[in-house]
Amino acid sequence: MTNSLSIHPSPAAIRVRGLVKRFEGKTVLDGIDLDIPTGQTTVIMGGSGSGKSTLLRCIIGSFPPEEGTIEFLGVDLTHATETQRNEIRKQFGVLFQSGALFNSMTLAQNVALPLEEHTSLPAETVEIMVKIKLELVGLREHADKFPSQVSGGMKKRAGLARALALDPKVLFYDEPSAGLDPVTSAEIDQLILSLTKQLGVTSVVVTHEMDSAFTIADRMAMLDKGRMLKVDSRDYFDTLRKTEGELPETQALIRQFLRGDAEGPITQRKQGSSYEEDLLGKIGPSLTPRPSVQATRVGR
């Protein structure tokens, strides 16, 4: 299979090199390298527990890495001052899985919050900007509703309007289709495409929904068990998922994930450990299993 790229990456808005993240001694990200091209949509994909959401949180500064560097719009976040970090935070917006709206505020008030916290704009200007952001996501007529009064898809769109409030250069989406029906999910995909084109932002989307990924991506990055398996164009991954016959193990693993096949390297790996080991823990070769309770009576 040839590795021909139809997309030539533009200069990177984000560069990740040698990123390592551990929790309680367990390595969750193991030497991640990743470039996010400016003005494109990069999809980070992988199964549950692969480390994709952890990678996103490291990039936005929620989790400090143990090793490696993260360069964001030319600033090395791993060595930046707090003042530099605060300035960078104004350059990106995040759409979280649930929308993360404040239930006690209307949709308009939720969108206005970043403008009120981080700018000195007069109230009249803030009101106009809120209407503009809500119009971008098709919610201007619902501005005075509370999150409890709107659907899940509308909450996602309101969260996106808030992420757009400060006119960010980079937008992060954490599982934007999670919990949505197929039609609403498709609407969110089209909204991501539209905003990326209209506003010229760099988009980073974390997802395991393949229909969505192939709809919105310019480039795709595949994580597996904390390691980066492959970063390439959407066309490369599209060709791989349509390829039949034998493939090297890594490519076969990626193909199984892209297709959602029931059989393949991922399934075989899950079946590799026995039920007894999974239940009781592996017993070392030099250890003899013992009963957990010693008998107190001798049989007659």
Image (cartoon, rainbow, N blue to C red):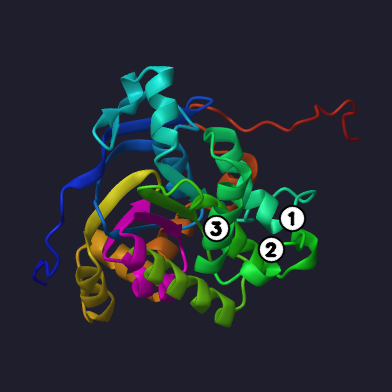
Per the model, the C-alpha gap separating discs 3 and 1 is: 13 Å
Foreground residue, 215 or 148? 148
> Disc 2 marks which residue?
143
Q: Amino acid at mark 1?
A: Thr
Foreground residue, 234 or 126? 126
Q: Which residue sits at x=26%, y=75%?
A: 238
The mark nearer the N terminus, 2 or 1, is 1
Residue 232 coordinates in the image, percent (x, y) = 21, 60
Q: Which residue sits at x=34%, y=27%?
A: 77
Closer to viewer: mark 2 or mark 3: 2
State which region is magenta. Answer: 197-224
In this rendering, position of residue 86 left or right of residue 43: right
Per the model, the C-alpha gap separating discs 2 and 1 is: 7 Å
- Mark number, residue 106: 1
Badge 1, how many Cα within 10 Å: few under 14, some, many 20+?
Answer: many
The mark nearer the N terminus, 3 or 1, is 1
Q: Amino acid at mark 3?
A: Ala
Foreground residue, 104 or 272? 104
Q: Which residue sits at x=37%, y=23%?
A: 84
Foreground residue, 130 or 42? 130
Q: Are marks 2 and 1 in contact (CB under 8 Å)?
A: yes
Residue 212 coordinates in the image, percent (x, y) = 43, 72
Per the model, the C-alpha gap separating discs 2 and 3 is: 11 Å
